[in-house]
Amino acid sequence: MDFRRLEKADKLYRTIKEFDEALSCLECDGGTKYPSIVFEIKFDGPDGREQKQLPMTLSSEFISFIKSEIIKARGSAVAEFNKIFF
């Protein structure tokens, strides 16, 4: 195995770990957490920023979408990683 393949495998491994960490933010032992999405808006003012929370229904839809996309991307990275070694 050459050095380039090892570098690529290392990068994919780190990417897979990042996907796992992202998924762990959205899940817990008993199932799914109910996180809400909060946008931070920066502007010129006394505090310089403001936070706006999305309604729970919309947050839940976004979270479901984000989770499914992370799972797809993680699956692709795992498949590519496995091609290197198997």
Image (spheres, rainbow, N blue to C red):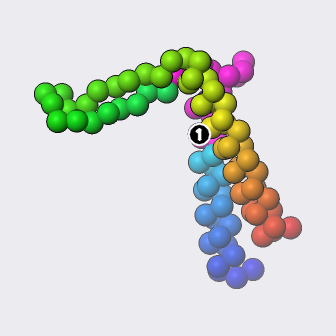
Circle 1 is placed at which residue position?
22
How busy is the neighbourhood of tag 1: few (under 14 within 10 Å), some, or many (20 plus)? some
In the displayed structure, does residue 76 sit left or right of residue 65? right
Query: Which residue shows up at 71% across the image and 39% down it?
Result: 68
Query: Which residue shows up at 73% across the image and 47% down it?
Result: 72
Q: Quadrant of residue 40?
A: top left
Q: Amino acid at mark 1?
A: Ala
Above or below — where is 81 with respect to 45? Answer: below
Q: What span is in magenta?
A: 20-36
SS of the residue at dot 1? helix
Q: Position of residue 48 (x, y in %)?
A: 20, 32
Q: Position of residue 14 (x, y in %)?
A: 60, 56
Closer to us: 18 or 45? 45
Q: Position of residue 46 (x, y in %)?
A: 13, 27
In the displayed structure, does residue 49 sit left or right of residue 8? left
Q: Quadrant of residue 84?
A: bottom right
